[in-house]
Amino acid sequence: MTPHGWAVLFESDRQRACADRMLVLTSLEIPHQLLTDGGRFILIVTEADLHRARHELYLYEQENRPPARPGVAMLPAQYDPWPGVIAYLLVLIATAWLAGEQAFDSDWLTAGRVDGAMIRDGQWWRVFTALTLHKDIGHLLGNMGFGAFFGFLAARVIGSGVTWLTVVIAAGLANGLNTWLLVASHRSIGASTAVFAALGLVAGFVWRGRLMAQDRWPYRLGPIIGGIALLAYTGTGDESTDIGAHLAGFVCGFGSGIVLTHLSRVFRDGRLQMLCGIAAPALLIGAWWLALR
């Protein structure tokens, strides 16, 4: 029962919450008492001081309000990833067959591989054509498997068309960057640069898009740490592995993923997904047309 002439100012089941407010009232020389009622703690003040006490506690609570946590983003609409994955596999298989048959009476390996000197001389299309060439069946199957897996994950949240156009462009940029940093005699082939661009794309989009819980640092950095771990585990093989291209692919893909988080509303348009899905193989076909002229 509240004493006559006194009014309830604050109630809580935690004594600490009342104690903090009592310190405020004490510093302002506002008379107060702490009562208990069945495990509840009740802070009371005189009726004459009630209005002033409420105002001062309001100011105290505003100043000590905990910073709002960034909300966890909701997972966007789930896209169908299979069209892009199937197209990726068909492109690699078709190119492998055409190169093996030396279609159009051309040496596809010589015409399409990354060649530092020729790229610097203006043959920019090589940064794209090299993505579809492989040295043997093992090399081809490995890139088909990992590329399909990472591409599936990315296309699930970004969409097949946008994902694979982004992967092709990011991987081409990575090949160009790697060539620029290395000696002019550098040569390489393989879709592994695109594989790690897809991995970076997933990591960047998930991290920047806050698709994982953000209240603890392991969750905030989880996509980055996971991506780097996979890069280290799968991208640093034997002495023939082009580690620079793998790293550049991951970095370019990661940056692309961050950019795409700002465009997520745009690429929800099915027509845009279709256009991008057509543009990705068209870019490769155009590059090969230039290479085989």
Image (tube, rainbow, N blue to C red):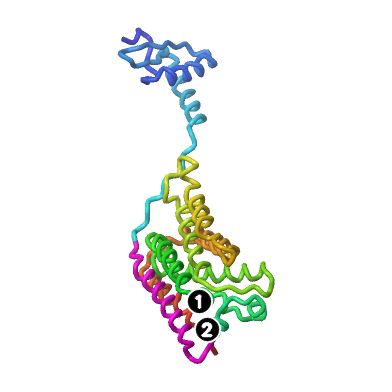
Type of residue at label 2?
Answer: Trp
Locate the C terminus and report the quarter of the image it occupies.
Answer: bottom right
Report crowding for label 2: few under 14, some 14 to 19, many 20 or more residues within 10 A (C-alpha): many
Type of residue at label 1?
Answer: Leu
Q: Nearer the viewer, residue 145 or 41?
A: 145
Count of numbered labels shown in the rendering: 2
Part of the protein shown in magenta: 79-108
Mark 2 vs mark 1: which is more N-terminal?
A: 2
Q: Nearer the viewer, residue 247 or 290?
A: 247
Residue 107: which quarter of the image? bottom right
Outermost residue, top side: 4
Q: Which residue is mark 2?
A: 108
Q: Which residue is mark 1?
A: 133
- Residue depicted at 53% across the width and 67% down the height: 193
Report, in whole angstroms, how far the alpha carbon at label 2 lies from the one at label 1: 8 Å
* 249 left or right of 181 in image: left
Q: Give how far across and how far down residue 211 sits, in percent.
A: 42, 51
Q: Does residue 145 sit above or below 130 in this rendering?
A: above
Locate the N terminus and report the quarter of the image it occupies.
Answer: top left
CB under 8 Å between callouts 2 and 1? yes
Residue 217 in magenta stretch: no
| Disc 2, SS | helix
Q: Main secondary structure of the magenta part?
A: helix
Q: Nearer the viewer, residue 178 or 256?
A: 178
| Disc 1, SS | loop
